[in-house]
Amino acid sequence: MDTKRGQEVSPTYWDEHAEIIHEENLRKLQFNRLQKTVNKAWYHLPYYRRKMGEAGFRNSNDLRSLSDLSRLPFTTKQDLREAYPFGAIAEPMKNIVRIHSSSGTTGTATVVGYTHNDIITWSELMARTLVGGGVNEDDRIQVAFGYGLFTGGLGVHYGAEKLGATVIPMSSGNTLRQIQILRDFNISVLCCTPSYALYLAEVARDSHIDWENTHFRIGIFGAEPWSEEMRAEIERQLPILAYDIYGLSEVIGPGVAFECEIRNGLHVSEDHFIAEVIDPASGDVLPPGEKGELTFTTLTKEGTPVIRYRTGDISSLISTPCSCGRTMSRIQRVASRTDDMLIIRGVNVYPSQIESVLLRFEGIEPHYQIIVSREHYMDTVDIHVEVSNNIFSDEVKTLENLKKKILEALKGELNLACTVKFLEPKSITRSEGKAKRVIDMRKKEDVP
């Protein structure tokens, strides 16, 4: 079992009946709820009725077992964009008590509606998520996810209140004030992106903050892919156990899956969602253990139900039972997305893979950028990474030896030939939200 400072953590459940439900009972529950979801989509969302008809369904009653799920059509982000603003909402607007939306920075925004029951469900799921990470009603939780149309801040907020913990709704930004609140209010749990946690740690270190004199003990992180090496770095710089949570606004927001105390995969709340892993190219369902694209079907969402929603996130299902006792299936932590995959001279590379290699080397800071460009019809990759002051001030020979080892590791493990440039600390602009890891200059060029 995972420990910190020699203290063993015992499994705790928020909703024991749901979290350790017998598989046979779970499948009955899922099928009953799936039938209701499909029926609702058929009669209230024209684009679903059209797509299901094209897939061979004569009516919603053609769904006769859970195995028929694979016959249902996929939902894509484009489907939801084309339904903008309210075409994906399956309830009369008088029943919608909340609207959330994506930023729309990469295209038309996706809009998601929540009924009163959806908000109650979401709060329960987030309470379940927080308890899975060892949070309890005695904790003081600083929510540094953004509030507003983004689901992160309010999702965690409502779950923490449901749990009975004390919530400090800081939202994102204002880093010095964040650190002051962390100390003065005796915060024990921080919720934010992992990259922002590292930035907080860096600013605190520069301000000579002694975390040992605080109540800080748990970090709940999500909203961006991060590696195990990044987790280790966060726990090295902050006196916490770092837990991963997973969600997306099109499904409900945070609360879809969470790490328990064991921290070996994320438990999917299967009483509310069905997870599948598919081949991104063919759409075929993949067996446990094989990596592919995650899809989710909502089972209880009233405002905006989605069926087999293609998330773009890369993961795999874990078939072995978890020693925490939960019977809900698990997914591997999401470290990459189909849309952040870089194709470099025919080689598929994810930023998280590069991060994993970089952070194995002592003196390398967890702040980097990958610059991809094209010269003379050939892709080039330049990795800019910060190193510690001690390393940066070392002899040229020492720096070159370190750089050589990193290049060899990247070439050996990822088959990636590139250049590496060492930067002094704080050279790369910090983000108070999701970190920008990749700058792909090829997108600015008129190339095939």
Image (tube, helix red, strand yellow):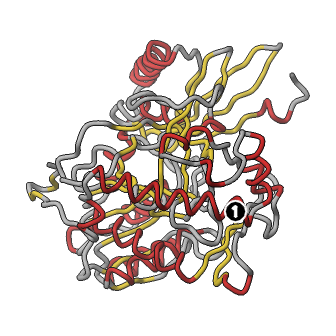
In the image, what residue occupies the spot 76% across and 14% down? 378
Closer to us: 329 or 70: 70
Name the residue at the right extreme.
Answer: 446
Q: Which residue is drawn at 40% across and 55% down?
A: 270
Q: Residue 11: x percent and y percent? A: 17, 60
Image-quadrant location for residue 82: bottom right
Q: Is residue 16 above or below residue 80?
A: below
Q: Which of 443 and 397 is in front in this view?
A: 443
In the picture of the structure, the residue carrying the numbered disc 1 is 102
* Amino acid type, mark 1: Ser
Q: Is residue 252 left or right of 315 when viewed as pictured?
A: right
Task: Tell me if 284 is positioned left or right of 89 in this view.
Answer: left
Q: Pinpoint residue 295: horizontal percent, then vertical percent.
A: 56, 44
Q: Where 153 sits versus 52, above or below?
A: below
In the rendering, at what x and y percent does residue 382 appear?
63, 27
Tag 1: Cα neighbours inside 10 Å, few (<14), some, or many (≥20)? some
